[in-house]
Image (cartoon, rainbow, N blue to C red):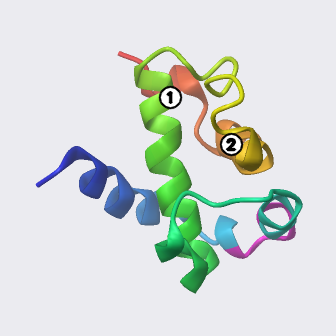
Amino acid sequence: MYDSVFIHESAYSIEGGKSASGEWCDAVARDSCVPDAYVNSNYADNFAQVAVLWVHLVGTGRDKDFSGTQFACMRNQLLQMAKYIPAASIQP
């Protein structure tokens, strides 16, 4: 299994309704992009895919600036994810 699939599926266990919250839906609405077309189906899938990206950014040390402008179009989603899954909780 790919690490990203494991992280994606695991994200559902910590999601706990967060993807249906006003703050998450607002973050998605304020951004101009999402991780991929798959997440357009529902907010829970969006949450799980953003969790994959967030874990990758933390693991590569690029969580402080969200990898510069590369992911600027989903900055609000990443800011919310940083609140839900603090970097310190997933760093080795």
Asked if disc 1 and disc 2 are in contact, CB closer than 8 Å, the reply is: yes
Q: Quarter-wise, where is residue 82 in the image?
A: top right
Q: Dot 2 corresponds to which residue?
A: 78
Q: Residue at x 86, y 70 (%)?
A: 22
Q: Position of residue 72 (x, y in %)?
A: 74, 38
- For the C terminus, the quadrant is top left
Q: Residue at x 34, y 50 (%)?
A: 7
Crowd tier of the residue under label 1, counting other residues whose Cα lies within 10 Å: few below 14, some 14–19, many 20 or above: some
Main SS, magenta region, reads helix
Secondary structure found at label 2: helix
Location of residue 39 in the rendering, given as x and y in whole percent from the top left corner: 54, 73
Q: Residue furthest front?
A: 70
- Mark 2, Cα crowd under 10 Å, few <14 / some 14-19 / many 20+, is many
Q: Secondary structure at mark 1?
A: helix
Residue positioned 48% across, 61% down in the render: 48
| Residue 18 vertical placement versus 91 (above, below) | below
Residue 85 percent across, percent down from the top left: 58, 39
- Say which label, 1 or 2, has the lower sequence index: 1
Q: Camera-side residue: 28 or 22?
A: 28
- Labelled disc at residue 57: 1
Which contiguous range is marked in magenta? 20-24
